[in-house]
Image (tube, rainbow, N blue to C red):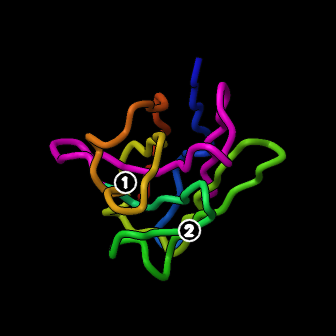
Amino acid sequence: QIRLAESGGGLVQPGGSLRLSCAGSGFTLDRYGLGWFRQAPGKEREGVSCISNRHGTYYADLAKGRFTIFRDADKNTIYLHLNSLKTEDTAVYYCAAPCYASTWWVPGGYDYWGQGTQVTVSS
């Protein structure tokens, strides 16, 4: 059974950093890439980034230059490093599988989701 578990969220001041983790079980990262999404209150879920099973990385415009996605295959875990955080980055962040390069930003293209981790950016 495929499971995804996010961690690493929290409260951070504007300009600060966080590292989110998504640990996968029931599959390997060589089979499935993983994506990161976020959802703020009253807004639709939006794609943030994806790392494919072939190590390709993809970012939404909101993430380019500030967020970095990477993976540790030995731990079957992906990470999303969030830098230069803004108040508008406040949301629940989810990881999901599988990520495909052609549609990575589309929530409907994913079959498995984690429970999410809250990121709050506030002074």
Give the alpha-carbon distance from disc 2 to disc 1, as whole Å: 26 Å
What's the residue type where badge 1 is placed?
Answer: Thr
Q: Residue at x 46, y 40 (%)?
A: 96
Residue 21 forms part of the magenta stretch: yes
Q: Residue furthest bottom?
A: 65
Q: Which mark is residue 56?
A: 2
The front one of 77 and 84 is 77
Most foreground residue, 107 or 93: 107
User: Residue placed at 69% from the left, 39% from the top?
Assistant: 28
Give the extent of the magenta segment.
18-46
The location of residue 119, given as percent across then percent down, is: 46, 48
Label 1's element?
A: loop
Badge 2 or badge 1: first in the primary sequence: 2
Q: Tell me residue 75's x, y (percent).
A: 80, 43
Residue at the outermost left position:
42
In terms of image quadrants, where is residue 79? bottom right
67 in magenta: no
Choose between 70 and 14: the one closer to the eye.
Answer: 70
Q: Is residue 28 above or below residue 59?
A: above
Mark 1 lies on residue: 90
Q: Is residue 101 above or below residue 78?
A: below
Asked if the residue at tag 1 contacts the one at tag 2, i.e. Cβ–Cβ closer than 8 Å, the answer is: no
Quick one: which residue is furthest to the right in this view? 74
Disc 2 on helix, strand or loop?
A: loop
Residue type at mark 2?
Answer: Gly
Which residue corresponds to the image point at 76% horizontal and 53% vertical from the top-left?
72
